[in-house]
Image: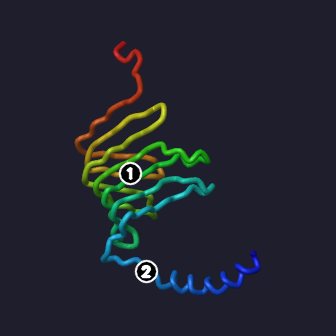
C-alpha cells in the first residue's frame, strides 16, 4: 500500500508547494477564528492566543477581538494555569507582550486560585506578569485561615 501512495504523494507535493507559496496574509481583511500557539524550547505549550477576529496591523502587531489567552504550565502535563479574557487586545508575538485599553479578566486555576478584573492592562509572558492600571478588583478563591489575627 505504501508503494501505491508514494507516486500519488509525489504528484500532489508540487501542487501543495505552489498553493503554500501563493498564500499571503492580507493586511486589509480580518482573520476569523484566529489562533496562535507558542511552545517552550522543549516542545510543550507555553501560551495560546485566540480571538474571534484578528488584524495584522504590522509585521510586529496583531489586533485581536474577543481575546482568550491560555497560559500553560510549560510542562508535559499541558495544564492551563491562567486564562486572560479581554474584548480587544494588541499582541506583539516577537516580544511576547499583549496589551489592552479595555477590560481584562484574569482567572488563575489550581490551589492558589484567584480572579482579577480591571482595565488598561499589559501582559508580559517572559515574566508571566500582568499589570492593570484602572478599576482593579481581586477575588481570592482560596480559604484565608487566621486572616484577622
Q: Is residue 75 left or right of residue 109?
A: right
User: Relative to the observer, which residue lies in front, 20 or 12?
Assistant: 12
The image quarter in which residue 66 lies: bottom left
User: Label 2 belongs to which residue?
Assistant: 24
| Residue 112, position as x, y percentages in the image | 45, 32
What residue is shown at x 34% (from left), y 52% (from top)?
Answer: 122
Q: Is residue 34 left or right of residue 79?
A: left
Helix, strand or loop status at disc 2: loop
- Circle 2: is it few (<14), some (14-19), or many (20+) Cα within 10 Å? few
The image quarter in which residue 30 lies: bottom left
What residue is shown at x 51% (from left), y 59% (from top)?
Answer: 38
What residue is shown at x 46% (from left), y 64% (from top)?
Answer: 94
- Circle 1: is it few (<14), some (14-19), or many (20+) Cα within 10 Å? some
Number of the front mark, 2 or 1:
2
User: Label 1 belongs to which residue?
Assistant: 123
Looking at the image, what colour scheme do you see? rainbow
| Residue 65, position as x, y percentages in the image | 31, 60
Amino acid at each position: 500500500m505504501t508503494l501505491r501512495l508514494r507516486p500519488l504523494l509525489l504528484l500532489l507535493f508540487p501542487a501543495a508547494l505552489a498553493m503554500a507559496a501563493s498564500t499571503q496574509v492580507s493586511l486589509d481583511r480580518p482573520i476569523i477564528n484566529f489562533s496562535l500557539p507558542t511552545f517552550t524550547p522543549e516542545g510543550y505549550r507555553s501560551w495560546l492566543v485566540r480571538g474571534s477576529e484578528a488584524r495584522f496591523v504590522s509585521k510586529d502587531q496583531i489586533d485581536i477581538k474577543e481575546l482568550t489567552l491560555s497560559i500553560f504550565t510549560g510542562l508535559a502535563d499541558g495544564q492551563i494555569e491562567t486564562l486572560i479574557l479581554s474584548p480587544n487586545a494588541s499582541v506583539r508575538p516577537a516580544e511576547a507582550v499583549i496589551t489592552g485599553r479595555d477590560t481584562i479578566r484574569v482567572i488563575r486555576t489550581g490551589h492558589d486560585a484567584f480572579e482579577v478584573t480591571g482595565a488598561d492592562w499589559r501582559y508580559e509572558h517572559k515574566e508571566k506578569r500582568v499589570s492593570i492600571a484602572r478599576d482593579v478588583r481581586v477575588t481570592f478563591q482560596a480559604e484565608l485561615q487566621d486572616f484577622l489575627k
